[in-house]
Every structure is written in structure tokens, then in C-alpha cells.
Amino acid sequence: MASPRSVLQLDEHRTFGKAPTGPPRRRLRRRWRRLATTLAVAAVVGVLVAGLVDNLEVRSRLSAERQTLARDLVVHHRTAHRLVATDSSTRYTVIQRNALHWTVDAASTEYAIASQHLSTAKTALALQNYAIGVLHQCLGGVSQTYNQLSANNLPGAVNALDAVAGPCLALEGGGAGGPVYPFDLADPAVILAGHTYYAFGTNAEAGAVQVISSPDLKHWTALGNALPNLPSWAVPGYTWAPSVIRLGNSFVLYYTALDAAADEECISVAVGTVPSGPYVDSSTQPLVCQTNLGGSIDPSPFVDTNGNVYLDWKSNGANGQPATIWSQPMNPQGTALTGSPTALLTPTQPWEGGVVEGPAMLVNSGSYDLFYAGNNWNTANYAVGVATCSGPSGPCTKPLNQPLYGNQSNLVGPGSPSVFADKSGNIWLAFHAWLPNAVGDPHSRLLFLRQLSFSNGLPVVNPPS
Amino acid sequence: MASRTFRWWLALGLVIALVVSLGTWELTADLGARATLRQTDRAVAALQQRQRDLEVRLDAAQARLASAGRQRDAAKAALRQVSADLYLTQAALNGANESVYVNVGAIDTLNTCLNGVVEALNQLSIGQRNNAVQSLQAVQQACSKAAPSVG
């Protein structure tokens, strides 16, 4: 069998080398066939080559795309890694931030607390420095007073005390319902004369009857001794519970003194032309002295609405008789008793502890209120009571079964009440009391003032304003 | 003659078979390559989309990091300030407390002095001069210590 090349060579030889042996029609058809075959082969080869080229191009593009993919993957992985790292850093930073915030919050809280403590400490320090300053002022005045007393200069001592009354009063709570005068002023009685208030108190180094004055019931000034000379029958240094009333152009002072002859407490009277004194007692014997009832003390004058004058007082009680509050009419000058005494009140309630004393009568809108003190004066049980009376001479009943006014946060054992009207007609209760933690002799009994109001016909002690 | 024709057709058949095989192989390879190319194109597109998403997330994360960093720095600054204030306040508080402590002692001494003087005055007011002197002597040391000018 001949190869295709041999066949071609054979055909070429026949076509171009030598003359064809077959008929022309066959030769022509053969030539066409060869041409068609050649063209077909060329076409096929061309298609194959074109396909091959296209394939190569596709593969080239594929290779490029694969490289792009690989490069993008690397970039993607790097980006993802950066993202993870950034997230991690963010978490760490947030943790740091939160921890710092917590620390700042804690420090801020601590700072706020420290600032508050500092403010409190500064306030305390300022108050302390103020208190120390006030203490120095008060002590300085007291020291001067002592020096004056040592030199027997009584007026100088009074002036020295008066000069430091404000600082000493501040130390004892003045201005906040505390005492209005820093020094001992027991059994006080207050009157208004003109535009000035005068308060009188039991004997002290300042004198037999202390007298102080004030223009406003807040700031008080020591005036000295209202009773420089005692009657001959009275023992010096034993004068208590003064009361003063204006009758006509005179001021009449009632007080308790120790009768040397009877060795009993008795009541006397002195007269002055000005409220601060001096008052002159020209008596040769006591005005009241119930020796059979244990003596008479705590005189308190009272002028009824019709102008009649009365004197109320207390008998100490003796010979089986209880302490009793009495009332007796007086002459219009208030210097002598008239008629006979009437018993107004005796102790009947447990809180009184068997004692009623320090009477003070008030007529208000036709109602007679008798203020008094009950229980032991030298204890914290001392308190102020009230009774309602039909008139100056009684009879009286006790509307309460307890004190009208007892211990408060800033005072203890209030008692020895007196009543007076201020410039506006307001009714006030004056009394003495101990300071808390300073109860009983020899501590001071200090002057307190409270305004009164009335509810359902009964007096009410208003809280300090 | 028959033999030559047969050989011719045989050769032609072989050539055609070869060409068809080559074409088929080429076509198959081309189709496969194109399919792979399309797949790769899609993978590249998807990856690029993911890359863009990732970059957006990265930008957001970096913004968060920067914000957290600023907040942390601000907190550090605040902490430094508060710590400084706290230190100064505590120092002032210690000083004030020390002064208060000292004052308490001074006030106690002054009160002791004053109480003695008041007691003496009260005793004087009732004529007990000897007791008053004793009361004053009892507080003389306190008065001298608290207020030399007074004592």
C-alpha cells in the first residue's frame, strides 16, 4: 500500500510532469477534488490554529486572573489580619479607657468626699476659731471682773461683765432661743417702762437686786444693784425673787429677804422713782412674813382691770401645811396690804413634787391665768404650770395635769415665771432655767424669754422665733 | 485503482479523524479553560468585594480605635487632674483636721477655764469667797495654758 505522499507525488507527476493518461473530464474533476481537499485541509488547519491561539489566549487570561486572585488573596489576608489586629487594639484600648474611667470615677468620688470633708473641716475650724475668739473675749472680761472684784470695785466689775455680755452670751446659745443674758439672773421679773425693758433678778455679786435693761428684749445691759441698802431687819446677801410694778409715778419693788429676828424668809417692799432704782426700803419689819407657814417668798404684784392692786406670794409650808400661793389686796400705792389673804393654789399634781411657788397673775380678755413653778428649784424637775382663776382672789383650778412648760433642748428646769407685755402688746413669759449639763447650784440660772399665745382660753408658750 | 482509491479515502479518513480529534480536544480544552476563567473571574470579583467590605470594616475599626484612644487619653488627663486635685484636697484636709484637733484641745482647755471661772462667779454671788478662790485655783493651770493673758 502506497503512502499519501506517494499518491500525491504520483498525482503531481501525472499532472505537471507528464501528460495525463485519463480523459480530460476525469482529470479536471480530480484537480477540483484536490483543490477542494487542499482548501478543506487549509481551512481545518486554520480553524485548528485559530482555536489553538484562542485557547492560548484564554489560558493566558486565566493565568493572569489566577495571579490577580492570588495577589488579592494576599492583600485580603493582610487586610483581615490588620482588621483583627485593629479590633484587638480597640478592645485593649477600650479596656484601658474603661479602667481609666472607673479610676477617674473612683478618684472623683474620693475627691468629692474629701472636698466635702474639707468643707466640713473648714467650717468646723472657722466655728472653732470663732468660739476660741469668743471664749477669749468672755474669759478676758471675766478676768477683768475678777480683778475689779479683788479691788472691791463693784461698778468696775459690773462694767467689765457688761462689756463681755455678748461674747459670753454667744457661748451659751443666745440668739437661738437660748438665754438672753449670759450671767446668773435667777427669779427674773421684766417690766416695760417707756421704751426700755428692765429685768430684775435674785442677788448676785452685782448686788442684792440685780437690774439689767434692754431696748429690744435681745440685747441686755447690766445696770447694777437696784436695792443698794437693805432695811435693818434683813440679813445682807439673802435677797431673792424681786418684782417691780409701776403705780402712779412710782415704781414699787417687792422682794424676799431673810428676817434676822425670825430667821425666816419674808417679803418686803421698796419704792423708787425710776425703774432702775435705787429703790428705798424704809420698813422696820417685813410686809409679809408667815412664820407659822415656813416663811413667805416670791412676791408678785398684780393690778386688776379696775385698778385694784394685789400681791401674790408663796408660803413655804410648815406645821403640816403645804406650800401655798396666796393673794391679798393692797392699797393703791402698793405699799401696804389690805383685807386678808386668800389661798389660791396648793400642790396637787405629781409633777409639782409638793411645791408650788413663783406666782405671776395675768388677766387676758377677762380670763385670769396664774402662772407658777412646781417641784424642786435646784433640779431638772422644776417646771412652769398654769391655773385659771375666776378673779384675782380665786378660786383657781388647774386645767392641765402636766406642766405648761418644762425641759427643752436648750434649757432645763424652767421656773419662777413672770409675765409682761411688750411695746406691741404681745404677752411674754420671762423665766429662769439651767443650761443643759449645768443643772443645780452653783451653776447659773439664766434669763429666758418666750412669747405667749392663747388657744381655747389657755396660754401656750410659743417656741423661739 | 480500487486500492489507490481506498488508500486515498483511508488517508483522508485518518486525517479527518485526526483533525476532529484535535478539534474536539482543542474545543474541550478551550471550553474548560473558559469555564475556569469565568470561575476565576467570579472568585476575583467576590474576593474584591470582600476586600472592599473588609476595608470598610477596617476603616470603621480604625476609627473606633482612634476614638477609643482619644477617650483613653482624655481619661488619662482627667485622672491626672483629679489625682492632683485629690492630693491637694487631702493635704488641705489633713491640715484642717490637724488644726481642728489642736483647736479641740484649746477649746477644751478654755472651757475648763471658763467653767471654773463661772463656778467661782456663782460661788461669789452667794458669798462663798473661799470656795470661789478654790475654784479659780483649780482651773488656774488650764486658764494659763489656754489664754496666758487671761490666766
Image (cartoon, rainbow, N blue to C red):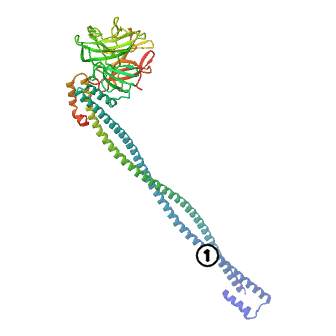
* B22 left or right of A301 in image: right
Residue A374 location, x and y as percent? 33, 16
- Nearer to me, B48 or A193: A193
* Residue located 27% across and 15% down the image: A257
* Residue located 75% across and 86% down the image: A31
View extreme (top): residue? A339
Compared with A62, A28 (above or below) is below
Quadrant location, the N terminus of chain B:
bottom right
- Nearer to me, A370 or A50: A370
Q: Is residue A372 visible?
A: no
As helix, strand or loop, the secondary structure at mark 1 comes to helix
Quadrant location, the C terminus of chain B:
top left
Please report, as a chain letter, where disc 1 is located: A
Residue A176 location, x and y as percent? 38, 28
Compared with A402, B89 (above or below) is below
- Nearer to me, A148 or A356: A148
Residue A9 location, x and y as percent? 69, 90
Question: Which amino acid does the dot numbered 1 rest on?
Answer: Leu
Locate residue A236: give its quadrant. top left
Locate residue A231: give its quadrant. top left
Residue B20 location, x and y as percent? 66, 76
- Nearer to me, A102 or A122: A122
Q: Is residue A119 visible?
A: yes
Locate residue A113: give its quadrant. top left
Label 1 belongs to which residue? A56
* B44 left or right of A255 in image: right
* A50 left or right of A285 in image: right
